[in-house]
Structures are given as structure tokens and as C-alpha cells.
Amino acid sequence: MRALLPLLTALLVLLSGCRRPVGQAEPFPEDFVWGAGNAAFQEVTLTEAHVQALRAVGLTHYRLSLDWAALLPDGENLNTNEADRVAAELALLNDAGVEPLVVLYQGDMPARFLDEGGWASAESPVWFEHYARQAFDAFGDAVSMWVTMADPFRDRLNAHRLPVEPDTTLRPVSAAAPPFVQARRAARAQNPEQSTRALLATRLTEMHHMLQAHARAKAAGAQAPIGLIVGAAPVHPADPENDGPAADLEDQYRNGFLLGGLYEGAYPSDLLEALALDLDAPETEADFLGIDYFAPVRVEADSLSEHMGVRLIPNLDGDKSAFGEADARSLHAILTQVADRYDNPPVYVTGNGAAYGPIDELNAAGRIRDELRVRFLRRHLVRAQLAAADGVDLRGFFVWSAFDAAGPPVSGIIAIDSVSGQPVFKDSARYLRSIAAANAVSRMPF
């Protein structure tokens, strides 16, 4: 029997298509960035204990976002109290050897600018440039990577959505939403008769202004690299033969508008024609691209749909978290799609994670065995590594999120004890620590 083991191992390798023996870890690129993050609206205030927890997991980077409205309440002048708070958090991270990736905009805009139209205003790029320059001056020495915008598409989707329009990629916004989301709801309620097609055009116009804002901030210069995060997702047709054109148009809308503007200097012509828009993309670039990926999109053609003749459909089969369909293969698909279309830019997965609810968050004798999240991360890390092995210029992976926030969904790999305030490592944190330490992931068992 012992003599047969080499033959059996070779057979398994052949059948699995692995380039290494079954179970052997496949490496990520050298100097791969391991990170996790939280956003300003989640109200996670970093302490020494938080930062040491990040170090214990083996993370090299932490993603956080600034609150534009808190830093510049009047849109002009820096709030020194908020600036001091941010500077203290950045100092904690740097002192511990955890490099900050700082997002300038993730949903928060000063009330004055919201009253003047928000991103619908052609002046919004000028407002943002002023804010970016203030942030660069205040925090530039302490930031390793800057991001101008986090997922403009998602931001504008949440700002303008009709009740009848489904969102199959993420959970509905909770009743206990952050203030800026509540403000968007109020704005939608004041204009309930706006058609879906008009909403799509409005979203794209505002995303155009956001890309102009990115261009101004990038041109303003900073000591650290400046990138853009997109919420990219592959668009799958329900029936490839009949729904292919619908999927292509939805892909242009969700992915191609921003990425085409950023890397090709032009927005997709079919999309502009479908929505009767005349927009010229700004001349700009990014030092890197961040991709937030949580779930794919599935569509079918529907001539009665005002959504450009496209109907979004849920996948009723398979694994689901609060963030939508848990499909790791689609992470590989979107990474290779971006690489193939846009000359393989430097890419980071800046957001990927899951929330399965109380069943996955049970604290038994001080240990949270979030097995569903561990499975989710393992599958997605395998697909990320495969993309890198296939030639995608993948530079890093950030889990979403680092810490549990005050409200649902619970997505952190680290919980915070409600009594002591101390971090509690979930099994997902322990798993990520093993992967980061090895800078490699095993493709088996899968």
C-alpha cells in the first residue's frame, strides 16, 4: 500500500489540475498587502487595543475613511478637534507598524453642499478638491495610501433608488441607517415620480462629477499613492443566448462607466446613447485600483423594464450572506475581466467579506466560531490567489470588515466585548492570521 502512495498522489494532482501536491499552499505575490477595514459611518474608534489586535492578526494595512462633513463642517475650514482625533488614530496605526489606507469620501458630505445639490452640482469637483488638499496637508505624512472615492456606483445607487428597483448584490439599507443615508431617503421621498430611466441618467451624471473630483484630487498631488475604489461585479446573463446584450449593457453601467472613464478616457458609447447622455470623461489616472467585491449580478432581458430593458434577478440557489450571493468564482472573473480590458492595472481587493447573522456569531466560552465566514474567506482567497497566478497584478487583499460595528450587519473578523471593550478574535481572524503568516493559501480542501 505504501508503494502506491506516490502514484495516488500524482493521480490526485492530475485530476485536480493543481500545479503542486494536493493540500500544499499556493503563494501570493511577494510583498502582498494583508489588510482589513472599517468606514467612518460605522463609528469604530481605534484604541491601542484595536491596533494591537490588527497586529496580532498579522495585518500590514488598515483601511479607514474620513468624514468630510466632520472635518470641514462648513465646507471650508478644518475642524481641529476632528483633525486631532484622526491624527491620533493614524499615529496609533503607524506606531504599531500598521499602514493606513485612507479613503477621503465614503458617503459623507457637508450639509451646505448637500443643500446646493450634492454631487448633482457641477461645482462638486471643486468642493472636493479643496477638501482633498486640506486632508493631504493635515495627514499626508501619516498616510501610506490614499483613496479618493469608495464605490461611487454604490453611493449613487443608495442615493437614488425607486422602491420597485431591486438590488440583488447587497442587503436593503436598514431602518437604523447612518444619517447621510437617511438624508438620501428623504430626498427620494420628495421626488417619487422620477422615472427609472431618469434616475439612471442622474446617477451617471453624478458619477461623472465624482470622477472629475477624483481627477482634481489626483492632480493636487499627495506624498502617497492615490487610487480609486470601485464596487465591481461580473454581470451574468440568465440565458447567455438571449440575455447577452442585456448583460453587456448592465456591465457597462455598473463597471464600464467608471473604469472606462478612468483607463480609456471615454465612457461606454452604448450606455450614453441608451440614456441620451453627452458626457466627456476627464483626463485622469490612478496609481492603483481598489475593487470592493461582495456578490455578482445576474440579469435577463425585459423589454418592459425602464432599466434600459434589463431586469435584475436574484439567484435563488447557493450560499448567501447579508451582502448577497456568495460566489467566489465571480471574484476571479471580475479580477481577470479588469486585467484583460484595462491593461492589467495594479489592483487591490479592498473589500471582501460576509455577514451571516446570529447563527455565525455565537460566543461559546469566549470563542466565536464563525465557520460560515471562514468558509467564505477561504473560497475567496483561493480565487484571488488563482487570479494572481493567472497574471492579474494583484497587490493585496482587505477583509471587510476588521471590527464589528454598532449595528447590523455583523461583518467583523474581530468582535468587541460589550463590557470590557476589548477585542475578541473570531475564528475568521485566526484563519486570516494563518494565511497572512504563510502568504499562501491551500486550494484543497475546497
Image (cartoon, rainbow, N blue to C red):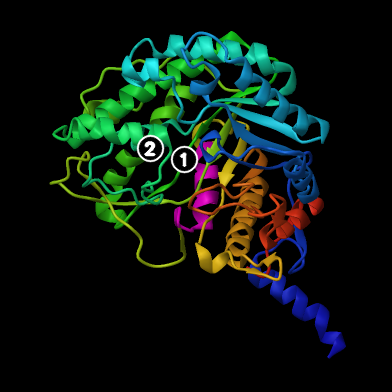
Q: Which label was assigned to residue 117?
A: none
The residues tagged by marks 1 and 2 sit, at their Cα atoms, a distance apart of 7 Å
For the question of whether residue 274 can be seen, the reply is: no
Q: Quadrant of residue 111?
A: top left
As helix, strand or loop, the secondary structure at mark 1 comes to loop
Q: Which label was assigned to residue 254?
A: 2
Category of crowding for the residue at label 2, using alpha-carbon neighbours closer than 10 angstroms: few (below 14), some (14–19), many (at least 20): many
**N-terminal-most mark, 1 or 2:** 1
Between 355 and 184, the residue placed more toward the observer is: 184
Position of residue 43 measured from the top left corner of the image (x, y, whole percent): 56, 38
Q: Which residues are magenta?
A: 322-338
Residue shown at 34% from the left, 31% from the top: 183
Q: Quadrant of residue 248?
A: top left
Residue shown at 45% from the left, 11% from the top: 127
Any magenta on residue 314?
Answer: no
Between 153 and 284, the residue placed more toward the observer is: 153
Quadrant containing the N terminus in the rendered view: bottom right
Can you say whether 202 is above or below 394 in the image? above
Position of residue 120 measured from the top left corner of the image (x, y, whole percent): 32, 19
- Left or right: where does residue 387 sit relative to residue 214? right
- Left or right: where does residue 201 sit relative to residue 227? left
Position of residue 108 measured from the top left corner of the image (x, y, whole percent): 46, 27
For the question of whether residue 93 can be seen, the reply is: yes
**What residue did someone put label 1 on?**
232
